[in-house]
Image: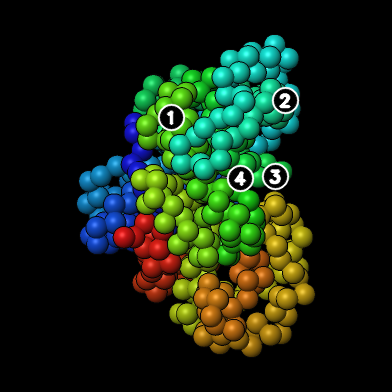
Amino acid sequence: MDIKPFTIGMGDRFGHQGHAQLKAVTTANAEGIRVHPTWNKSNREHTIIGTKPDSLRAEADEAVKAAGWAEPYYVDADHINLTNVDGFLAASNFFTIDVADYSGKPADSASIDAFVAKHAGLTGSLVVPGIAEPIALDDKQLRAAAEKFLWAIQEAGRIYRHIEAAKGTCTFVTEVSVDETDRPQNPVELLLILAMIAGEKIPVQTIAPKFTGRFNKGVDYVGDIAQFEKEFDQDLAILTYAVRQFGLPETLKLSVHSGSDKFSLYPIIKKLIQKHGAGLHVKTAGTTWLEEVIGLAESGGDALQLAKDIYLQALPLFDDLVKPYAPVVDIEKAKLPTPEQISAWDSETYVATLRHNAEDPRYNLHFRQFIHVSFKIAAKMGTRYTDALKANAEVIGRNVTHNLLQRHIRPIFGA
Ligand SMILES: [Zn+2]
């Protein structure tokens, strides 16, 4: 199964927005933006909410059928490993193999030696088309990369072969993610990781490195934009080179995780994928849940009260809610509204505080990140929450579609 060049990963924690999400994709296609949908949900999200992978498959199939979408679509088992992949085998046709936890665990010395010997041809002064300066690479760097990543990629190979044995060859898309490692990978490390992936014969079609800077959930990029641009440009050149050099699939492309709301990067990403004629996968997830809360707040009455109650119940559990997401949020508790303040908010104030419009002085990125990680509270509310989603489906759906189309798909993939 080949992946299409431009794909948008859409997460939907509560499984009610499949239609509204797909509408963003179908509208984009009607405008000539050839983007294909991927529904992604991680084991972590399934566990927190209490859903099963089959529910995401059912949601995607149903939305696709209702919209008459006749082109490929993907259901991504996001951030899986050998301990949890089995639950996703039937439902998914896209697997994001996450090996970040295994990085730093050294492989046996024989396989490290073999890797260094096999790729001796890369050492010296390596010329990669599209990268101005030749890359100076020596044995020491090869060995250091192998010591850090080879065992992790061998583990990715074991996971890949486990999926392949269950589903059959070429029946699914394989992504390898190393975005949740402790520090970013530079383009040279990306090249060496791709060499290791090829060595494991994993037909990788999307690769998610950890880019420089902070990719916090649901908010804009924080970091050195010029440095990001340089590295992203080189990463794209590296991918083209690795496809030729290591015989990886022609469809190989970058995957940007925590990709929602990185508005300051989108013009750069768009420019560079056009420059390289490259494909791209962008994962968004929690941005849709935030639009649900915005839609509830906008609806007023009981729905506004529900949106307030989520926050009021979440605040005393601040530490527990933030902890699983600590590497991907930066929340200053002192900048959050007090319970008294939020209790007094009207619809407009709530929406303006949460919606990602940096030009509105009321927008509060601490509040936005905290609501992002508070979906567990809504999950605990059970039918009170899901009934409110149904009762306010139109307002919520409008926000979900607008957010994906106007703030994400058009700026990233548009002409
Ligand atoms: Zn990720």
Q: Position of residue 389 (x, y in %)?
A: 45, 67
The residues bearing labels 1 and 4 have C-alpha atoms spaced at a distance of: 20 Å
The residue under the point 33% across, 51% down is 35
Q: Of discs 2 and 3, which sits in the foreground? A: 2
Mark-to-mark CA distance, 2 and 3: 19 Å
CA gap between label 2 and label 1 equals 24 Å
Would you call the spot at circle 3 few (<14 residues within 10 Å), some (14-19), or many (20 or more)?
A: few
Q: Is residue 132 visible?
A: yes
Q: Are marks 3 and 4 in contact (CB under 8 Å)?
A: yes
Q: Is residue 293 left or right of residue 394?
A: right
For the C terminus, which image quadrant?
Answer: bottom left
| Camera-nearest residue between 407 and 239 | 239
User: What colour scheme governs how the chains and residues are painted in the rendered image of this protein?
Assistant: rainbow
Sooner in the amino-acid sequence: mark 1 or mark 4: 4
Q: Amino acid at mark 3?
A: Arg
Label 3: which secondary element: loop
- Mark 2 crowd level (few <14, some 14–19, many ≥20, 10 Å Cα): few
Task: Determine which residue is flagged by label 3.
Answer: 183
Q: Name the amino acid type tagged 2.
A: Lys
Q: Which dot marks residue 254?
A: none
- Amino acid beneath label 4: Lys
Dot 1 falls on a residue whose secondary structure is helix
Label 1 crowding class (10 Å Cα cut-off): few <14, some 14-19, many 20+? some
Q: Earlier in the sequence, mark 4 or mark 2?
A: 2
The one nearer the camera, 193 or 186, is 186
Question: Answer yes or no: do the residues labelled 4 and 2 have beta carbons within 8 Å?
Answer: no
Q: Are marks 3 and 1 in contact (CB under 8 Å)?
A: no
Going from N to C along the chain, the mark reached first, 3 or 4, is 3
Q: Which residue is mark 2?
A: 140
Q: Nearer the viewer, mark 3 or mark 1?
A: 1
Q: Nearer the viewer, mark 2 or mark 1?
A: 2
